[in-house]
Amino acid sequence: MKFVDEAIITVTAGKGGNGCLSFRREKYIPKGGPDGGDGGDGGSVYLIAREGLNTLADFRYTRKFKAKNGAGGEGGNRSGRGGVDTVIEVPTGTVVRDADTDELIADITTANQKMLVAAGGRGGVGNARFKSSVNRTPRRTIPGAEGDERRLQLELRLLADVGLVGLPNAGKSTLLRAISHATPKVADYPFTTLHPQLGVVDIGLGKSFVVADIPGLIEGAADGAGLGIQFLRHIRRTRLLLHVVDAAPFESDHDITQDIKTIETELNQFDRDLAQSDRWLVLNKSDVLPQEQLEEIKRDLIDRLQWDAPVYIISAVSGDGCKSLCNGIMQWLDEQEERKAS
């Protein structure tokens, strides 16, 4: 299914049923009195997060959702039936905003989380409610209230512990294949990855973490160039970024440092907090260069970039260094959980 991460829908809650104007009429009872019942409440509209959903594609075809109206009251003090609620299923990780005011309504981050987005109108009041000692035959009723109606902007942000960022052809998709059961498309041309991919990395002993492969960024991505700007929002939720770098570019005089700075610039322009989040450097394609040369490249990058975070040398194709990388990530995530708990 084509990945879609934004949608605008209209939700309309049901109208409350009207109150009833009625008087009791029975043989041999000339003064039966008022017996008009209340109207039922209108149905509401809810969003609920469902596991297994990973796209907003369904909202390309269905954009309007309406709950049922409440039924009107009846004579004999019979209240109207309440309107049936409408429940809309969305993927976990959906951010909901008012499309007209940009107000944040909900951030749905857990499975089965249910959120009211449009409240149904209250049912009207029948004339039986207005009976009093001084008003034995009230003819007053209150109609049902209108339900809420609003336009919602849905934005899907992937829920992953680790996000892979880097230029196209850095080997992110190959790395995701190597460390998880995900099967992203891999080829030797730019923008192989056209939408984010998720993979679960199983370390063993009941420990695992989720990795998101974000489409390659290029210079100017934060301003709309290439494909990356459409998906930068997804790495806002990640706890750790792996900056994957091609350690063996085709041109021998290619400046790897500049590649790294290009991504840093795009992250900073898109979200300054994101640029300052934890980010490790992963030098890929170690199977093409001698170990001594790789270590020299690593030392040079650390020196020129003033890099103080971990740096790993791996080969996503052969798997060399991938296990060490995954163990390091798992240990770091565990330490973060311990700090949070304390």
Image: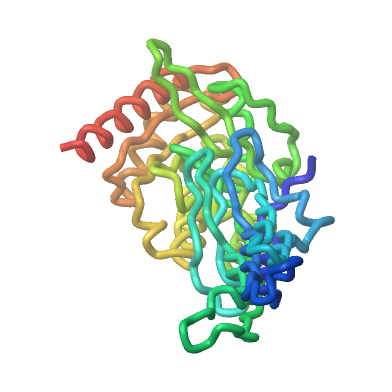
329 sits left or right of 237 in the view: left
Residue most extreme to the left: 342
Query: Of 210 and 119, which appears nearest the observer?
Result: 119
269 sits left or right of 229 in the view: left
Q: Quadrant of the N terminus?
A: top right
- Residue at image point 38% right, 36% down: 298
Placement of 100 over or under 236, stated as above or below:
below
User: Residue 317 location, x and y as percent?
Assistant: 61, 21
Asked if one can make out residue 324 in the rendered structure from this viewpoint, the answer is yes
User: Residue 162 location, x and y as percent?
Assistant: 45, 38
Placement of 304 over or under 317, stated as above or below:
below
Query: Of 87 and 3, which appears nearest the observer?
Result: 87
Asked if one can make out residue 10 in the rendered structure from this viewpoint, the answer is no
71 sits left or right of 336 in the view: right
User: Residue 48 location, x and y as percent?
Assistant: 58, 47
- Residue at image point 21% right, 36% down: 341
- Residue at image point 53% right, 80% down: 130
Residue most extreme to the bottom: 134
Q: Quadrant of the C terminus?
A: top left
Placement of 102 over or under 226, stated as above or below:
below
